Image (cartoon, rainbow, N blue to C red):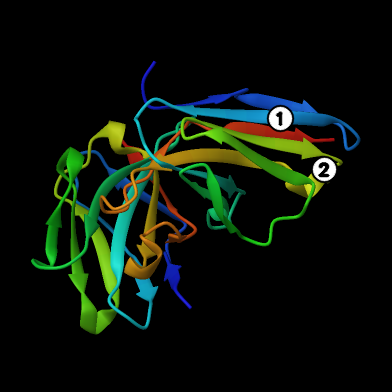
């Protein structure tokens, strides 16, 4: 596989469920990101990990819990979400120090009922 | 604080016609500017970026953008649009002191291509 892979592509969950989104990058990058994309809103940066360490938490509610076990994998654990959390969640990776290009996955479309 | 404005939510262009998508930014220091494209069901892909030097930047897929500091603009252009260019286009600004890791995106412009 190449690039940035996200699973699942679609997820429907109730407000009391616990689920996880997974992201894997095959580009050898050392930084990974979670973005939230909602209709008619700019992309919102949620979390940044550099060399497995979280370097940015953009005031994200604690019902979103990221995990980065190594530089190639990133998870977003979800629990007790709200309907307004329904969105496309995009994972991205980059190589720090090489000029800022982000490589995005295709996203996980989340619907919270 | 940085901000990006893309004033056009939708634009429709005939196939073969020229295209210009507008982007205005607000940033107190030297801006580092990006254009990304998102095809339906896909993630975002970098089209081009401006860091310094020549204010006319060439990108992939025949796109170019011109940085105009006096107008705080970074408009994207293509001389002849193809049906496969139908997608959503995002302008973004980043800062050197964050390693470009905290890009601020605009709300996007959806391009429709008519036959």
User: Disc 1 versus disc 2: distance between alpha carbons?
Assistant: 12 Å
User: Quadrant of residue A104 in the image?
Assistant: top left
Q: Determine the chain carrying the residue at label 2.
A: A
Q: What element carries label 1?
A: strand
Query: Left of B65 or right of it: where is A61?
Result: right
Front one among B29 and B5: B29
Report whether A17 appears left or right of B91: right
Who comes first in sequence, dot 1 or dot 2?
1
Q: Residue A34 carries which label?
A: none
Residue B56 appears in view: yes
Q: Where is residue A63 in the image (x, y as percent from the top left)?
A: 79, 47
Tell me residue B82's x, y (percent). 23, 35
Report the residue at 32% width, 53% height from top.
Answer: A100
Quadrant housing residue B114? top left
Dot 2 surroundings within 10 Å: few (below 14), some, or many (20 or more)?
many
Q: Residue at x 60, y 24 (%)?
A: A9
Which picture quadrant has residue B80? top left
Disc 2 target residue: A81
Nearer the observer, B5 or B84: B5
* Left/right of residue B103 with respect to residue A108 in the rendered view: left
> In front: A66, or B112?
A66
Image height check: is A54 above or below B99? above
Q: Residue at position x 34%, y 66% from top?
A: B23
Q: Where is residue A72 in the image (x, y as percent from the top left)?
A: 47, 30
Q: Which chain carries label 1?
A: A
Query: In this view, which residue lies farthest toward the left?
Result: B54
The answer to whether residue A106 is above or below residue A40 is: above
Q: Mark 1 points at which residue?
A: A20
* Discs 1, 2: same chain: yes
């Amino acid at each position: 596989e190449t690039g940035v892979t996200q699973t699942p592509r679609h997820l429907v969950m109730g407000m009391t469920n616990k689920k996880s989104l997974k992201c894997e990058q095959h580009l050898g990058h050392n930084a990974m990101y979670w973005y939230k994309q909602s209709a008619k809103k700019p992309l919102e940066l949620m979390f940044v990990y550099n060399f497995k360490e979280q370097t940015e938490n953009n005031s994200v509610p604690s019902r979103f819990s990221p995990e980065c076990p190594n530089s190639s994998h990133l998870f977003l654990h979800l629990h007790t979400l709200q309907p307004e959390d329904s969105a496309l969640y995009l994972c991205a990776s980059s190589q720090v120090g090489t000029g800022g290009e982000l490589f995005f996955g295709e996203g996980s479309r989340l619907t919270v009922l | 604080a940085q901000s990006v404005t893309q004033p056009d939510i939708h634009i429709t262009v005939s196939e073969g016609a020229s295209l210009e998508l507008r982007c205005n930014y607000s940033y107190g220091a030297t801006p580092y500017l990006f254009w990304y494209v998102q095809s339906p069901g896909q993630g975002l892909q970098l089209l081009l970026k401006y860091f310094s030097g020549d204010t006319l930047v060439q990108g992939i897929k025949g796109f170019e953008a011109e940085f105009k500091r006096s107008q705080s603009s970074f408009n994207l252009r293509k001389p002849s649009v193809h049906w496969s260019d139908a997608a959503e286009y995002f302008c973004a600004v980043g800062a050197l002191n964050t390693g470009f890791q905290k890009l601020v995106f605009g709300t996007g412009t959806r391009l429709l291509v008519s036959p």
